[in-house]
Amino acid sequence: MSYTFFSNSEEETLNFGKKLGSYLRKGDIITLTGELGAGKTKFTEGILSYFNLENEISSPTFTIVNEYINENINIYHFDVYRLSDSSEFYEIGGEEYFDKGICIIEWAELIEDALPSEYLKVSIIKDNLNENRRIMNLEPFGKRFENLVNCLV
């Protein structure tokens, strides 16, 4: 089972991320795939806005992981684009973050074999006919995320 959401603007992408954020809890993992400029960081900004952290966001491209903290939860925003494979993810202790808060992982297809059995995969695709439109496919892995996707529809 998967779910597809169509966004026609950055604002709609932000709002959809914020809506998803309202269902997230400690231990949840969201993976983001899509080409450069597809909107992965904008979607993450939407999630962070639910937790009143939208002004904190910066792309973690050069640091691998950025940590955002509010009074209730830690959010770890990974960009694993520069890693060659999952062994490097293990070397930096990436899997140790999984149960400490919410993990959002950009370019997660590079470390798919390091992911636990339950997570939500969000694929963001640019629409070639409309530069502002994005197609977001949500693919749940595990019962928790199947239920979460059902709440979003």
Image (tube, grey):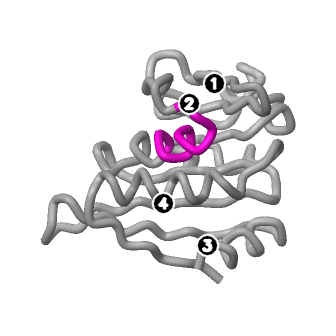
Is 62 situated left or right of 83 in this image? left
Q: Give the mark nearest the N terminus, 2 or 4.
A: 4
Q: Give the mark nearest the N terminus, 2 or 1.
A: 2
Is residue 102 visible from the viewing direction of this image?
Answer: yes
Q: Can you identify the residue that label 2 sits on?
A: 53
**Residue neighbourhood size for the residue with mark 4, other residues' Cα within 10 Å, grouped as few (<14), some (14–19), many (≥20):** many
Specify the quadrant of the image occupied by residue 147. bottom right
Amino acid marked by disc 4: Phe
Q: CA distance from mark 1 to mark 4?
A: 20 Å
Placement of 128 over or under 66, stated as above or below: below
Q: Can you identify the residue that label 1 sits on?
A: 68
Circle 1 — which element? strand
Q: Give the mark nearest the N terminus, 1 or 3.
A: 1
Amino acid marked by disc 2: Leu
Amino acid marked by disc 3: Leu
Q: Quadrant of the C terminus?
A: bottom right
Q: Can you identify the residue that label 4 sits on?
A: 16
Which contiguous range is marked in magenta?
44-53
Amino acid marked by disc 1: Tyr
**Residue neighbourhood size for the residue with mark 2, other residues' Cα within 10 Å, grouped as few (<14), some (14–19), many (≥20):** some
| Count of residue discs | 4
Answer yes or no: do the residues labelled 2 and 1 have beta carbons within 8 Å? yes
Report if residue 103 lies within the magenta region. Answer: no
Is 81 situated left or right of 85 in this image? left
Q: CA distance from mark 2 to mark 3?
A: 22 Å
Placement of 17 over or under 71, stated as above or below: below
Q: CA distance from mark 4 to mark 3?
A: 9 Å
Q: Can you identify the residue that label 3 sits on?
A: 152
Taking the spot 74% from the left edge, 29% from the top edge, the residue there is: 74
